[in-house]
Amino acid sequence: MSSETAVSLSSPCMLPKAGCLFDPRRLYEIAQLGVDLPTEAAFATVIAALEQEYPGHICTRQDWIFSVAGGAMGQLTLLHGSLREYIILFGSCNGVEGHSGRYGSEVFDFVFKGEMHCEYEGRFALETHTPGTVAYLGPSVVKHYQIKQEAWMLEYARGTIPAMLPFGLADSLVSTLDFRTVGRTLRNYGRLVVKELVTQRKDLDLAAAYGLGAAALAGGLCMARKRGPS
C-alpha cells in the first residue's frame, strides 16, 4: 500500500497540527475501546472517552442523521464541529458505496466494527480496513470506498471544514431533495461552531479571516454596483 494511505501511529500524518485541538494518535487509541463491543455500547464507550479526553469540546448527545454524499448513504452523528475540525461517528448496518470527495482537508477513519474497502486512483490493489485500523485520506486525494455489510468508525477531519460542506450536502439538495437532512446538518454543525467560538474561544483567528474575506467581498460587490456596467 502507498505511504499516503497505509498509516501507523508513527506516520507523519498522525502528528498533531498547530491550531488543531485533536491528536489523531489519541483518537486512534480511543477508537480501539469500541472494538469487539456491541454497536451501541461501542458508541457510548467512544463518546465517553472523548469527553473525558477533551472536556467541553464533545457533544455527548447522539443525533443520528442519514447522510448522502458522493452517492453513498450512511448514518452519522456529529460529536465535534468547529471551523478547523470535526469528529463524527459514521457507518451503516446495510452497506455503503461511493465517492469520498476531494478536499483540501485531511480525513481519518478509525474503524472499530466491520470492514471498509478502499480503491484509489491509479492503484490496482484493494485496501481493506478492519477493526483497529485507520484509513487516511490526504489533501486532494480521492477514493472509491465500500462497506459491504456493516461497519462503524470514528471519523476525524482537520482543515477548512466549511469548504467540505458543499460535497456533503449536494446530493441531499439536488438528488434526494431531503431538505430536512440539510437543515438538521447545518443546524447541528452551526450550533457546535458557535459554541466553540463563544465558550471555548476556538478558531477565532479563522473566524476573523472569514469575516474579513466576507467584508471584502461585500465591499467589492457594493463598489461594482455603484459603478454600474462598464
Image (cartoon, helix red, strand yellow):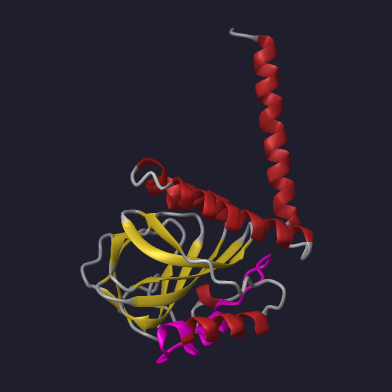
Q: Is residue 22 magenta?
A: yes
Quadrant assignment, res 120: bottom left
Q: Nearer the viewer, residue 166 or 21?
A: 166
Residue 68 vs residue 209: left or right? left
Q: Residue furthest bottom?
A: 36
Where's residue 22, x and y in %?
Answer: 62, 74
Residue 110 vs residue 201: left or right? left
Res 124 seen here: yes
Magenta highlight range: 17-40
Q: Quadrant of the C terminus?
A: top right
Q: Nearer the viewer, residue 133 or 199?
A: 199
Quadrant assignment, res 161: bottom right
Residue at 28% of width from left, 75% of height from top? 127
Where's residue 8, x and y in %?
Answer: 45, 83
Residue at 37% of width from left, 41% of height from top? 174
Q: Where 176 sits versus 100, above or below?
A: above
Residue 31 vs residue 191: left or right? left
Res 160 seen here: no
Q: Is residue 11 magenta?
A: no
Where's residue 81, x and y in %?
Answer: 61, 62
Where's residue 148, x and y in %?
Answer: 24, 73
Q: Where 216 sits versus 24, above or below?
A: above
Q: Nearer the viewer, residue 93 or 127?
A: 93
